[in-house]
Amino acid sequence: MNSSLPATIVCVDCGGECHLLSYEPHDGWRAGDVVAYRCSDCLDRWDLVLADEDLEDRQVSADGST
Ligand SMILES: [Zn+2]
């Protein structure tokens, strides 16, 4: 549980709330994973590919290189 994506993001189209559709894998999110959000206002679906930067600041350093 060292990484958690926001349950909602702001829709870039309408400013509404997009809810996370994807479930976190057992081994956690990794760069390259695709997560889907759906806007509750305009019903647009957003597929985001996770990058290292998306996860970096949430990772607990296990190798002591803080
Ligand atoms: Zn929207």
Image (spheres, rainbow, N blue to C red):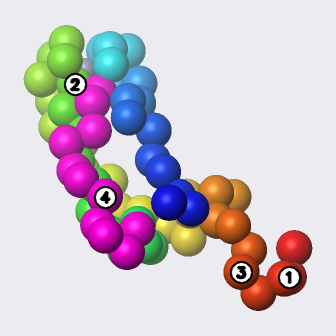
Residue at mark 3 to residue at mark 2: CA–CA distance: 35 Å
Q: Is residue 52 above or below residue 34?
A: below
Q: Residue 42, located in which quarter of the rendered image?
A: top left
Question: Are discs 4 and 1 less than 8 Å apart at CB?
Answer: no
Q: Which residue is mark 3?
A: 62
Left or right of 6? Residue 26 is left
**Foreground: disc 3 or disc 2:** 3
Residue at mark 3 to residue at mark 1: CA–CA distance: 8 Å
- Amino acid type, label 4: Glu
Q: Which residue is mark 4?
A: 24
Residue at mark 3 to residue at mark 4: CA–CA distance: 20 Å
Task: Identify the mark at residue 39; answer none if there is no mark.
Answer: 2
Instruction: Pick whichever of labels 3 and 2 is earlier in the sequence.
Output: 2
> 10 Å neighbourhood of mark 3: few (<14), some, or many (≥20)?
few
Residue 53 visible, this orientation: no
- Residue at 34 percent across and 25 percent down: it is 11
**Foreground: disc 2 or disc 4:** 4
> 10 Å neighbourhood of mark 4: few (<14), some, or many (≥20)?
some
Asked whether mark 2 and ligand 1 are closer than 8 Å, the reply comes as: yes
Residue at mark 1 to residue at mark 2: CA–CA distance: 38 Å
Question: In the structure shown, which secondary structural element does the residue marked by tag 1 occupy?
Answer: loop
Camera-nearest residue between 3 and 36: 3
- Amino acid type, label 2: Cys
Task: Identify the mark at residue 65; answer none if there is no mark.
Answer: 1
> 10 Å neighbourhood of mark 1: few (<14), some, or many (≥20)?
few
Instruction: Pick whichever of labels 1 and 2 is earlier in the sequence.
Output: 2
Q: Is residue 17 above or below residue 47?
A: above
- Residue at 32 percent across and 14 percent down: it is 16
Specify whether residue 57 is painted magenta: no
- Amino acid type, label 3: Ala
Residue at mark 4 to residue at mark 1: CA–CA distance: 26 Å
Question: In the structure shown, which secondary structural element does the residue marked by tag 3 occupy?
Answer: loop
